[in-house]
Image: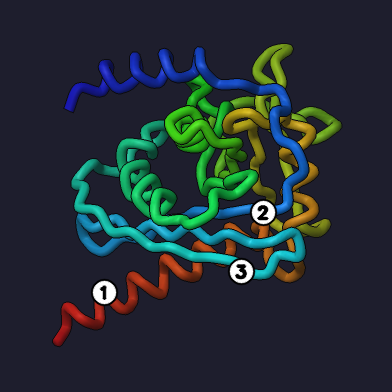
Amino acid sequence: MNIEKLKEEQLATACKVITTDELGEARTIAGCDCAYVNNTVIAAVVVCDDKLKIMEKQVATVENDFPYMPGLLYYREGKAIKEAFAKLKNKPDVLLVDGNGVLHPLRCGLASQLGVELDQPTIGIAKTRLLGEEDEAGNIRVGSEIIGAEFKAKEHAKPIYVSVGHRVSLERAVDIVQKTTQSPHKLPEPLHLAHRIADKARQAMEKAAEK
């Protein structure tokens, strides 16, 4: 495993990331998340309509022993997510990813790498902030550069961190996250659903292994 080579790959991909809005009307919004059974990565992709009703869901499992390393999530989860995404009959207008986009030391987290690889508008949504400081407006800054935004579903909820993945502006990304988050969940509904489906697949796999 050559970490430096992977980081060079991320830097090269970062140059291809588009941070302006190329997204038209977001009629279909997907979410993707992963669960694990040992070295098996289970990826779920859920596509919702603009009323947040499920239109389609797909699951893929991939063997991958790449360890969890902050900033390198694509190399652990990317292949499984791409396989699940490839099964979709209709591609979504935008994909919400459980991971960072440009809110990343190399400006190229999981959401950005997937977005470039799939040529797909993506939004990064992370539960932890890898870097930067929050300003009074809720933007995450590194120096004078704005690379993300803090979002809270309600006043005392734990924040999530929104960033551009690919082909979406930060303003639009925050707007989509806001419109797709439903109480009592702190995550946007497509992402919450993907998490549930991946977890259900994990439980089924663990139960089958016990027999």
Q: Which residue is mark 1?
A: 205
Q: Which residue is mark 2?
A: 28
How crowded pointer 1 is (Cα within 10 Å; few <14, some 14-19, many 20+) is rated as some
Question: Tag 1: residue type?
Answer: Met
Q: Which mark is residue 54?
A: 3
Q: Upstream in the sequence, badge 2 or badge 3?
A: 2
Decide: is 12 above or below 102.
above
Label 3 SS:
strand
Q: Earlier in the sequence, mark 1 or mark 3?
A: 3
From the viewer's perspective, tell me whether residue 146 is left or right of residue 8. right
Q: Amino acid at mark 2?
A: Thr
Image position, residue 113 (x, y; %): 45, 30
Q: Residue 37 appears at what percent x and percent y? A: 25, 64
Q: Nearer the viewer, mark 1 or mark 2?
A: 2
Q: Residue at x 21, y 81 (%)?
A: 208
User: How far apart in space, not on screen, are marks 2 and 3 (Cα)?
Assistant: 10 Å
Count of number-bearing discs: 3
